[in-house]
Amino acid sequence: MKITLQSSQRELLRSAVSSEMTEAEFVSLLEDENEPLRQFFSYYKCAIMEIETKFRVLNEQFSLDGESNPIEFMQSRVKSYGSIYHKASAKNIPMRLENIEQEINDIAGIRVVCSFIQDIYRLADCFLSQDDIFLIERKDYIDSPKKNGYRSLHLIVAVPIFLENEKRMVKAEVQLRTIAMDFWASLEHKLRYKKDLSQEKLALLSDSLKDCADESARWDDRMQEIRNMLEE
């Protein structure tokens, strides 16, 4: 869903160059246009606040119904200039805010960490059933994990934010995962991006991380089974 840009932002777009721009040039361009840039990124911050509020309300509702709170914690972030630049470069997206807005769906990101696998799907269903949440894409890496063992439920959504004189639709990525999935993903990221590793060590690291992912998946399945037994 396209977000209409202000006239000052359109001037910035016209002055922007192609995807061959360097990261330093890209960051410099953004910083030179401080006001439209702050406005652009504020929309994503507002989208995060809207989505986090929806999940907090759901969490509170479950507790009022006599159930344990399904959400252990939430984390959120807006992508940095550098992250946006590298993603745009990798996907050959022109370095213009308009193109970035249209083509990059995870500038706003929210991670919802749950206790059990069942909680993930229940929360996702409740969240997506709300009439002001529009699902753009769903990727279930729990049912079909990535080759490296990564597991999580990813939802690309558009959510309305209500400003002084307008309503805007803003895209965001929501990741739902268990504590075990989040623990593995955090450590995998730290280990994977260590520098100066030989191909032999990288291969050994990949195999070991995949074994850990499989083991954590067995823990999740077993804990869900125990919970189901207790609720029977």
Image: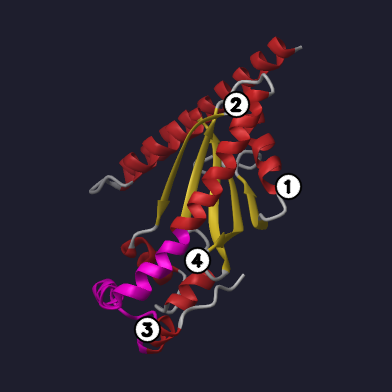
Earlier residue among tags 4 and 3: 3
Residue range in magenta is: 15-44
Q: Secondary structure at mark 4?
A: loop
Residue 82 drawn at (x, y percent): 31, 63
Please name the residue shown 26% across and 73% down the image: 31
Q: How many marks?
A: 4
Q: Residue flagged by tag 1: what amino acid is it?
A: Ser
Please name the residue shown 55% across and 60% down the image: 161
Measured Cα–Cα span from mark 2 to mark 3: 46 Å
Q: Nearer the viewer, residue 161 or 148?
A: 161
Q: Nearer the viewer, residue 151 or 153?
A: 153
**Is residue 108 visible to us here?**
yes
Residue 41 drawn at (x, y percent): 41, 64
Q: Residue flagged by tag 4: what amino acid is it?
A: Ile
Earlier residue among tags 1 and 4: 4
Measured Cα–Cα span from mark 1 to mark 2: 20 Å
Q: Does 167 sit above or below residue 185? A: below
> Which residue lies most toward the right here?
232
Residue named by callout 2: 116
Q: Residue flagged by tag 2: what amino acid is it?
A: Phe
Where, by quadrant of the figure, is residue 209 drawn? top left
Residue named by callout 3: 12
Earlier residue among tags 3 and 1: 3
Q: Does 58 sit above or below residue 162? A: above
Earlier residue among tags 1 and 2: 2
Q: Is 195 contained in the magenta span?
A: no
For residue 193, side relative to residue 142 (left or right): left
Which label number is shown at residue 104? 4
